[in-house]
Image (tube, rainbow, N blue to C red):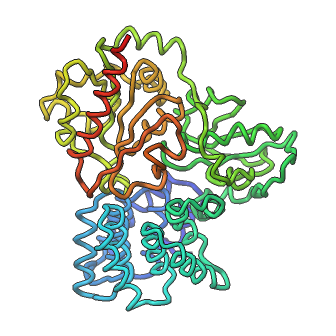
Amino acid sequence: MDFVSIISELWDKGQSAAAKRATAMFARLPHKADAQTLALAESAAKVGEIDLALDILRAVPGFPDWRDGVGLAAHLVLSIGRAAEAETLFHDMLRRWPDDEGALIGLATMQRLGGDLDGAEHQVSRLLAANGSSAPALVEAALLAALAGDRRRFAQLHAAITAAPQPDKYLLWRLIPGHAALEDWAALFEAMTFYPESRLPRLVRDLPPLAPLAPGDDLHGKRVLVIGNFGLGDMIHFARYLPDLAARGCEVHFQTRSALGRLFASLDCNVTCVEVIEDVSPYDARCSLFALPHLLGQTGAATLHRPAYLKAEPVEVARWGARLPRSALRVGLVWAGNPRNVLDIGRSAPLEALAPLFCDPQISFVALQKGEALAQALGAGLADRIHVPEDFDDGPDAFIDTAAVMENLDLVVSTDTSPAHLAGALGRPGIVLAKAVPDWRWNDRDGTSLWYPTMQVMRQTSPGDWAGLAMRAAERLQELKTGKARP
C-alpha cells in the first residue's frame, strides 16, 4: 500500500492525530496532481481539516492548471465562509474552462444564498445548457424553482433527479430547502434521513440504522445512539424530538459536543450525552438527529410548532438577573454568526448597519454575541449602548449563561444564529433578523416562525438592507416599550 493510501485510511478510521501529522508531512513533499492526492485532500476536509486540505492541493506543482484541484479548493474555501476568495477562484476557472460544472454550481449557490436569485438563474441556465442531464445542475434548478413557488417545475426536476437507478442521496439531502420553501413537510423530513453515511465515523456505520416506527411501537430496553454532528443551532432546533424518541421506551444516547450536555439535561427526558464514540457495542441502533421526525412519523405541519422544551437553570437566572442593567426594555442582541460557514453568506449584519435600534436611551441592549464580532461594539462607538456581560459563557458548559440571561430579558433580537434557536427553544419572545432569502429554518407564515411560536421573523426586503430591517425592528421595540409602560 502506498503512502497516500495509508494516510487516507488513517482519516477514514478516525485516527485523526496520526493522520494529521502524516498529511502535514505529505503536504511539504513534492506530489502529483492525481486522483490520490485529490482523495487525500477530500479525506482531510471531511473531518474539518480544511486548511490542511488546501495545503495539500496548493503544494502540487502547476496547481493553477490542475482543473480538479482548483475546483476542489474553491468549494473548500466556500465551505468555510471565504466567499470572496471562492468567487475569485470560480471566475478564474470559468475564464479557462467556460462550462465547468463545479464553478457554475459554486457561483449559483453563492448567489442563491446571498439572495441574488436572478444571478443564480443565469448560472443555472448556463449549467443546463452545458450539462442538461447533470443531477447537480438539476438540484440547483429545483431549489430556484421552489424559491419561486413553482411546485410543478420542482416536482418535474425532483422526478428527474430520482429517476436514476441509484440516485445520489446527498443530492436528495440538498433538496431540503426546496421542500421547506414549498412547505412539503413529509418530503422534507424524508430528505433529512439522507444525511450522507460517508460523513459518519466508520465505527458508527457498523451500527444498524433505526427503522421508521409505527404508532405504538415500543423500543423498551433498547439503547439508541442519536448522531448530532451538526451545527449548534441545528442541534438545539431538533433536540425537541429527543423526548419523543425516549417516550418509546428506549435509552437515548445523544452524540453531541460535551459542552452542550448541561443544556440538554433540561429536556423533559433522560438523555445521555456523549461526544466521542470509541465503542458501539453498548448500542442497539443509531439514527441521525435530523432523521427523528421521519422515524417517529411526525411529519405534518401541526408537529412543527412546539412550546418551550429547554429550560434555564433557576440559580443562574437569579444570579444574572442581579447583574444586568435596569431599563424600560431589556433586549438581547446577536448580530453575527460563525464566519467560517458557507451559510454565513448574507446572514450576519455589520453592527453599524443596525444603528436605528439604538436611538432610544430607555432601551438597553445586552450583547449575547460571542467571537470576533463582539469587538464591533467598541469599534462602532456603541460601548455605552450595549452591555457586554463579563465572564459570559466562559465556563465549560455552552449556553448556560445565555439561557439564564435570556430569561431576564424582555426580548431577544438576533440574526440567523444558534442563540436565535435557543431563544425559541426556551419559549422567549424574539425577533429574527433574516436575510431576503432566509435559511429554510426561518421560513415563516405571517411573520411568525413555523418552528417557534414566540419568535417573529423579519426579512430584508432586498438583499443586504440591514438598515431598513433595523428600522422595522426598532418600531417593534417601541411598540413593546409603550405596551409595557401602560398600567
> How many callouts does the rendering have?
0
Tell me residue 106's x, y (percent). 35, 72
Tell me residue 264's x, y (percent). 60, 31
The residue positioned 27% from the left and 34% from the top of the image is 475
State whether residue 153 is above or below residue 293. Answer: below
Tell me residue 4's x, y (percent). 48, 72
- Position of the C terminus by quadrant: top left
Residue 91 picture quarter: bottom left
Residue 413 picture quarter: top left
The reply to whether residue 32 is in sight is no
State whether residue 379 is above or below residue 481. Answer: below
Is 487 placed left or right of 282 in the picture? left
The residue positioned 29% from the left and 54% from the top of the image is 461
Furthest residue in direction front, as rendered: 487
Tell me residue 294's x, y (percent). 70, 55
Is 132 placed left or right of 236 in the picture? left
Is 164 placed left or right of 440 in the picture? right
The residue positioned 60% from the left and 80% from the top of the image is 159
State whether residue 95 is above or below residue 83. Answer: below
Furthest residue in direction top, as rendered: 322
- Position of the N terminus by quadrant: bottom right
Q: Nearer the viewer, residue 45 or 268?
A: 268
The reply to whether residue 160 is in sight is yes
Is 289 placed left or right of 350 in the picture? right
The residue positioned 73% from the left and 48% from the top of the image is 280
